[in-house]
Image (cartoon, rainbow, N blue to C red):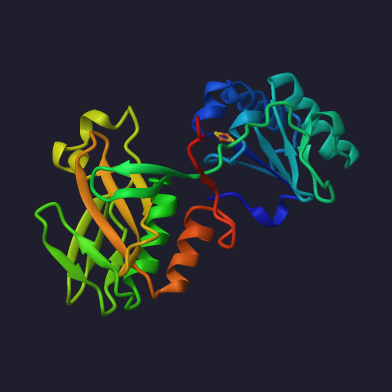
């Protein structure tokens, strides 16, 4: 029989993602579970291994519920202390916390600064003088982007490597149920690209065909003086081979606004542009 969750009053969520594993999360989990079992706390608690909690810089991380207590840098010693404090005293340990409900900011010693995306003026080999931004190429961004571009008639222009072009005036179905491939199909085009992550461990099991169509580089090329298309999203594989480009019509303001604010995380009224410094 599975766990009777109706009896569990406290839940420990142990991060079991890659960074936490590297930071020896398993040692803390073993210690914690042994302590829960031998302390007679097994039935009134529940412990779950999770995928990455999104705070790899503070690995290993735990979340304790109720209360939304986020613990950072959990060691086997801290693990036992955290459990005892929550279960026996109904309290938390402030000095080990990354965050708890009500805190205005997180308490992390290892906060990483993420480089913002910016447009840079370039003489692009395909588009000439343009503003070019290196944009997100992971499935977390590309799947929503493709849904936005293809699921409603958007008049985008799809440019294939064989110079074939299609204009999307009707809704297309966007499917991302495979481990790697996203498929766009509809009355006007068919497109298949790999966007799912291929980690080092998987490398040998993934076919060359999938690797060849795996998006590794994404760029937004903003052609301010172009009359028909305000920008093109260009996708290449990891070796720099062109896969497809998607022209964003100048008159589709909603789409351009989406690309700036959601896909590129910029203020759409004031996109970040870096111009060359004059000598
Ligand atoms: S792997 Fe644990 S927070 Fe990312």
Taking the spot 58% from the left edge, 37% from the top edge, the residue there is: 114
Q: On screen, 156 above or below 191?
A: below
Q: Nearer the viewer, residue 83 or 125?
A: 125
Q: Residue at x 35, y 67 (%)?
A: 149
Q: Is residue 176 visible?
A: yes
Kindly indicate the quadrant of the structure image that contains residue 44.
Answer: top right
Q: Where is ligand 1, by quadrant? A: top right
Rendered view: 272 above or below 112: below
Q: Nearer the viewer, residue 111 or 177?
A: 111
From the top left corner, tell me how far across and down residue 248 is, in percent.
34, 65
Residue 217 can be seen in this image = no
Q: Which corner quadrant of the image does residue 271 belong to? A: bottom right
Answer left or right for 191 relative to 62: left
Q: Is residue 164 left or right of residue 269?
A: left
Q: Can you say whether 141 is above or below 203 in the image?
A: below
Q: Position of residue 2 (x, y in %)?
A: 54, 50
Q: Is residue 74 above or below residue 146?
A: above
Measuring from the top left, give residue 222's x and y in whole percent.
Answer: 39, 55
Left or right: 175 in relation to 109: left
């Amino acid at each position: 029989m599975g766990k009777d969750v109706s009896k569990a009053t406290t839940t420990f969520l142990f991060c079991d993602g890659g960074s936490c594993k590297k930071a020896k999360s398993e040692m803390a989990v073993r210690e914690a579970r042994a302590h829960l079992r031998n302390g007679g706390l097994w039935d009134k608690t529940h412990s779950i291994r999770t995928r990455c909690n999104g705070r790899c810089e503070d690995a290993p991380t735990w979340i304790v519920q109720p209360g939304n207590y986020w613990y950072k840098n959990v060691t086997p010693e801290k693990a036992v202390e955290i459990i005892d404090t929550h279960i026996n005293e109904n309290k938390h340990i402030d000095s080990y916390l990354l965050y708890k409900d009500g805190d205005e900011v997180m308490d992390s010693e290892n906060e990483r600064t993420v480089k913002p995306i910016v447009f840079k003026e370039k003489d692009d080999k395909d588009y000439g003088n343009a503003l070019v931004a290196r944009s997100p190429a992971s499935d977390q961004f590309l799947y929503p982007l493709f849904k936005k571009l293809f699921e409603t008639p958007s008049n985008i222009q799809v440019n294939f490597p064989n110079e074939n072009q299609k204009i999307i005036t009707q809704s297309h179905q966007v499917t991302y149920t495979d481990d790697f491939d996203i498929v766009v199909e509809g009355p006007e085009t068919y497109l298949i690209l790999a966007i799912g992550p291929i980690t080092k461990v998987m490398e040998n099991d993934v076919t060359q065909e999938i690797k060849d169509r795996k998006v590794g580089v994404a760029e937004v090329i903003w052609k301010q003086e172009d009359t028909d298309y305000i920008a093109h999203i260009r996708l290449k594989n990891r070796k720099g081979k062109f896969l497809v480009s998607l022209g964003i019509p100048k008159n589709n303001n909603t789409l351009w606004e989406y690309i700036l604010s959601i896909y590129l995380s910029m203020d759409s009224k004031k996109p970040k542009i870096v111009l060359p410094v004059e000598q």
